[in-house]
Structures are given as structure tokens and as C-alpha cells.
Image: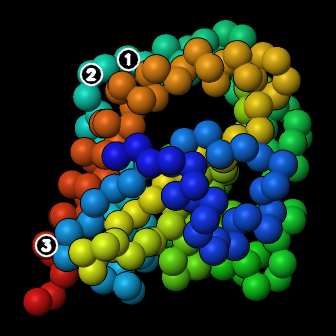
Amino acid sequence: MRLPKSAHTEQPWRIHQFTRDFRVEDVWSFRAPGAGPDDFPVMIEALKAAYDNRTDPAAVRFLFAVRWKLGGLLGWDDAKAGLGKRVASLRDRLPADLAQTIAKATPCTDPFAEVYQLETEAARELANRTVHDIMHLGWVATDDGGYELRMAALVKPNGIFGRAYMAAIAPFRYLIIYPSLTRQWEAAWLKAAGSRPK
């Protein structure tokens, strides 16, 4: 479910210390029935496993195939456009206590690089010629006594082109990508929760 940007900015996340030059683009919530306060690491592992074994709907596969094809043809995803080249990694801004959490993170094959992972929040990033993007994940108590995952996309577009690109893909994010992600992530949680010892 899409949330107002305040659902991210009003939380006491560590990420706020390092991303004042980024804008909050999207905030989305994902249900986690039966989750407790210590289940954030379980959710993160479930999401990574789901990515590595994903079966995206045809529309999602098509959109990403088009995006990667365009990126290859136009050089959007060249190594020179990425982290440590066109832009510095967010990891360069971290204090020691956050930087040392990277080594404990389980690898994933998605395009994002780990920034840090704590007990209730994590950050991952990617960069190309269009944008520097931070995916922030946080664990939040709900009014019914449970917990939910919140994902915030924090972006720093690369000039006018980057801003135009973000505007152009907005309908696809809201109508196709995020609804599909919601189904996948919520199913991943249910699978992980169902496999835990009773």
C-alpha cells in the first residue's frame, strides 16, 4: 500500500543522517501477519530468497527487459556511471558502527549493493546515469499490535534527464511494479513465517 512521505520522514531512522541531499520518491508498506518486533532479519532474508527464486509476472519481466535493453544501448548502466565512479557510495558517509554491519549481510543477486543492516532498518543502493537510488527498509509497529515492512525509495536524479526519467517511469512503478512487489514480498513473508518452528 502506498503511504505518504511522512510515513518515512517521521520515523527515527538512522538513514536520515546521511541522505539530506536525497528526496523521498516513494513510500510503500508490506503486510507481515503474525510478525513480532524481532522479525525484521527474518523478513530481509525472505526478500532476498524471493528475489533469487523470483517468477515475475510477464508485464514486470517485459518492463525490466525493455529497461535493461535501453540501458545497454544508451550506456545508462556502464560501470563508469555507477557507484564509486559517477557518484560516491553512501557507504563512504557511514560511521564505523554502521559500516561494520555490511559484512554480516547475506548476499543477494539483485542490482542493489548493501549499505547497512540493523535490527529494524536496512539500506541498499544503486547508481547509473539516470539516478542514485537508496532503497530503505524499515520495521514499524502497527496499530493492531503487529509489524509491517516499509520501503522508501530515496533518489538523487542525475540532472534534468534524471528528473524526466523518474517522471516517465512513475506510472509503471505505481500500476505494475509496486503492486507486483507487494504480492511477492508479502508471499515471501508468509512462506518464511510458515517455515519457522512453532
Q: Are marks 2 and 1 in contact (CB under 8 Å)?
A: yes
Q: Residues within 10 Å of mark 3 (few under 14, many from 20)?
A: few
SS for dot 2 = helix
Q: What kind of residue is marked 3?
A: Gly
Give the spatial CA distance, label 3 vs label 2: 27 Å
**Residue 150 image position (x, y, % from top left):** 45, 59
Identify the residue at horizontal 26%, vertical 66% (top origin): 32
SS for dot 1 = helix
Give the spatial CA distance, label 2 vs label 1: 6 Å
The residue pinned by badge 1 equals 62
Direction from residue 137 to residue 126 in the image, left or right: right
Of residue 88 and residue 156, the one placed in the foreground of this image is 156
Q: Is residue 72 above or below residue 88?
A: above
- Quarter placement of the C terminus: bottom left
Direction from residue 44 to residue 128 in the image, left or right: right
- Residue 142, label in figure: none
SS for dot 3 = helix
Residue furthest to the bottom in view is 198
The residue pinned by badge 3 equals 194
Q: What kind of residue is marked 1?
A: Phe
Identify the residue at horizontal 72%, vertical 11% (top origin): 74
Direction from residue 192 to residue 130 in the image, left or right: right
The residue pinned by badge 2 equals 58
- Label 3 or label 2, whichever comes before in sequence order: 2
